[in-house]
Image: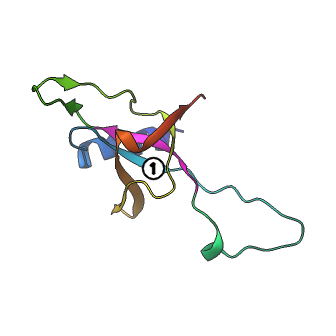
Amino acid sequence: MAQATTMAHAMKTTLRPLHDRVLVKRLDEQDEKRGSLIIPDTAKEKPQEGTIIAVGTGKVTDDGKKLPLAVKQGDRILFGKYSGNEVRLDGQEYLIMKEDDLLGILDA
C-alpha cells in the first residue's frame, strides 16, 4: 500500500491534468474462470473501473468562474468503455479523461 501512495505522489509531480480532466489508473483485471474455457488476453475486455491519480483545477464556465471537480485523488470510479485517452508514463498505462466521461464514484 505504501508503494501505491508513493506512486500517486510521484505522478502528481510528473503530470497534472488541466481544467476538468483527471488522470486515472485502470484497476487490474480480475481473472474469472468460466468452466474450462481459457480466454486469451487479447480477447479480454479491459476493466471500466479505476483510481483517480490526479485531478485538474476545475471547469471554467462561460462567465469565468471556476467550478471544482466532484472527484478527488484516490477515488475509485467507474467510466465509459471508450472514455479517455491512453498515455504511458514511466512504463505504466494511464487514462486522461474529462470529468464528464466519469459515470460514478464507487464506495470503498
Task: Please identify the dominant SS of the magenta region.
Answer: strand
| Residue sitting at the far front | 62
Residue 26 against residue 36 in the figure, above or below: above
The residue sitting at 32% across, 46% down in the picture is: 11
Residue 58, quarter of the rendered image: top left
How many residues crowd mark 1 within 10 Å: few (<14), some (14–19), many (20+)? some
Q: Which colour scheme is used?
A: rainbow
The residue located at (79%, 74%) in the rendering is 38
Whole-percent x, y for residue 65 in the image: 14, 23
Q: Mark 1 points at which residue?
A: 25
State which quadrant residue 62 falls in.
top left
As drawn, the residue found furthest toward the right would be 35
| Left or right: 35 in relation to 11 | right
Choose between 8 and 59: the one closer to the eye. Answer: 59
What's the residue at 40%, 55% (across, down)?
Answer: 94
Query: Taking 54 as reference, is 85 above or below it?
Result: below
Q: Which of 36 and 62 is in front in this view?
A: 62
Question: In x, y percent, where is residue 31?
Answer: 72, 59
Kind of residue at badge 1: Lys
- Please name the residue shown 39% across and 29% down the image: 72
Does 87 appear in magenta?
no
Q: In which quarter of the image is residue 33?
A: bottom right
Quadrant including the C terminus: top right
Viewport quadrant of the N terminus: top right
Magenta stretch, residue numbers? 47-55
| Side of 46 where 16 appears, left or right | left
Residue 61 coordinates in the image, percent (x, y): 17, 29
Q: Is mark 1 on a helix, strand or loop?
A: strand
Figure disc tally: 1
Q: Position of residue 104 (x, y in %)?
A: 51, 35
Q: In this view, does 44 lie to the left or right of 99?
A: right
Residue 24 position (above or below residue 46)? above
